[in-house]
C-alpha cells in the first residue's frame, strides 16, 4: 500500500486533471466493468464524503473502480457506522489515508443553520439525527455572525463541520487512534468547490 503522502499527491493530481479536462487513459479504462476484480480490492484512499449528487467522488479525483473506498452520508457526518467502515478499510486493506470531504453550498449545513435560526419546522427524527451531529461544530459561527444565510457564514460552517468530523475520527476509535499513533494512518480534511471543481486539502491543520 502506498503512503498517505503518496495517496494525497495522487488525489491532487487527479483533481487537477478533472479541473483542466485532461484525460487519464488508465483511470478511464479502470471505470469499465472488470470481472477479474471479484477476488480482492486495494483502495489507496478512504473518503468520507457528503452524499450530494454534485460531488461525484471518483470523478472529481479522476479515479477508477477499486481506487477509492468511499463512505457517503449527508453532511459528511461521523457516526458509529462511518467509524466502523473506516476501521474496516484501514485494517482490512492497509489503506493509509482518510479524507473527510465537505463541499461548498452544502445542503445539510444550510439545513442545520436554518434549524438553528428557527427558520425551519422540526424535522423527522432521522433527519434530526444528522442535524444534531452537525450542530455542535457550527453553533458558534451562527452566534458570532447572526446572518445564517450569508455566504461567508455558510462557507465557515462547511469548513468547521469538516474539521469537527476529522477530530471525531481521530479521537473516536481506539483502532483508528492506534493506527495514527503507529504512523499507519493519516486523516485530512478537504473541501470541494462546486463552483470551480477544485479540492482544497487542509493539510496543515
Image (tube, grey):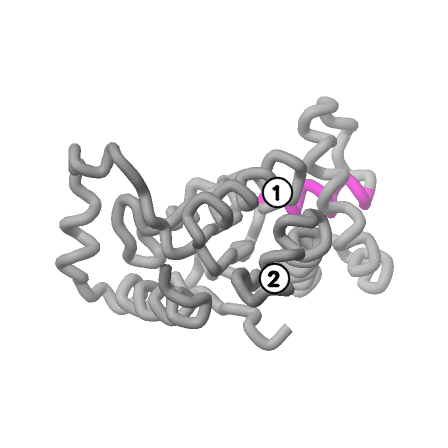
**In the picture shown, does residue 142 fall above or below 13?**
above
Foreground residue among 202 and 146: 202
Mark yes or no: residue 130 visible. yes
Look at 63% across and 49% down and name the residue there: 175
Query: Dot 1, crowdedness within 10 Å: few (<14), some or many (≥20)?
Result: some
Q: Position of residue 19 (x, y in %)?
A: 31, 65
> Mark on residue 49?
none
Look at 51% across and 57% down and name the residue there: 99
In the displayed orientation, state which residue is furthest to the top: 124
- Magenta residues (range): 107-117
Look at 73% across and 31% down and name the residue there: 128
Residue with the mark numbered 2: 180
Q: For the residue labelled by badge 1, is the local secondary structure a helix, a strand or a loop?
A: helix
Q: Position of residue 94 (x, y in %)?
A: 44, 53
Q: In the picture, which quadrant includes the N terminus?
A: bottom left
- 108 displayed left or right of 133: left
- 101 displayed left or right of 197: right
Q: Position of residue 151 (x, y in %)?
A: 64, 61
Look at 19% across and 48% down and name the residue there: 30
Q: In the picture, which quadrant includes the C terminus?
A: bottom right
Q: Say if the magenta span includes residue 109.
A: yes
In the displayed orientation, state which residue is furthest to the right: 143
Foreground residue among 28 and 67: 67
Mark yes or no: residue 190 visible. no
- 33 displayed left or right of 201: left
Sequence-first disc among 1 and 2: 1
Marks 1 and 2, how far apart at CA: 14 Å
In the displayed orientation, state which residue is furthest to the bottom: 204
Q: Say if the magenta span includes residue 136.
A: no
> Mark on residue 83?
1
Prevalent SS, magenta region: helix
Amino acid at each position: 500500500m502506498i503512503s498517505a503522502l503518496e495517496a494525497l499527491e495522487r488525489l491532487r493530481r487527479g483533481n487537477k486533471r478533472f479541473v483542466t479536462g485532461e484525460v487519464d487513459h488508465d483511470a478511464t479504462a479502470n471505470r469499465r466493468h472488470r470481472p477479474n476484480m471479484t477476488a480482492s480490492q486495494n483502495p489507496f484512499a478512504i473518503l468520507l464524503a457528503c452524499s450530494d449528487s454534485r460531488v461525484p467522488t471518483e470523478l472529481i479525483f479522476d479515479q477508477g473502480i477499486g481506487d477509492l473506498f468511499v463512505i457517503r452520508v449527508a453532511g459528511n457526518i461521523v457516526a458509529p457506522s462511518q467509524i466502523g467502515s473506516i476501521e474496516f478499510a484501514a485494517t482490512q486493506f492497509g489503506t493509509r489515508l482518510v479524507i473527510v470531504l465537505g463541499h461548498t453550498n452544502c445542503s445539510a449545513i444550510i439545513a442545520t443553520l436554518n434549524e438553528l435560526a428557527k427558520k425551519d419546522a422540526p424535522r423527522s427524527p432521522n433527519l434530526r439525527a444528522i442535524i444534531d451531529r452537525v450542530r455542535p461544530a457550527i453553533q458558534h459561527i451562527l452566534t458570532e455572525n447572526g446572518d445564517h444565510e450569508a455566504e461567508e457564514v455558510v462557507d465557515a460552517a462547511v469548513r468547521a463541520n469538516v474539521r469537527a468530523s476529522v477530530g471525531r475520527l481521530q479521537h473516536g476509535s481506539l483502532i483508528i487512534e492506534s493506527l495514527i499513533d503507529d504512523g499507519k494512518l493519516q486523516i485530512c480534511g478537504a473541501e470541494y468547490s462546486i463552483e470551480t471543481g477544485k479540492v482544497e486539502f487542509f493539510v496543515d491543520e
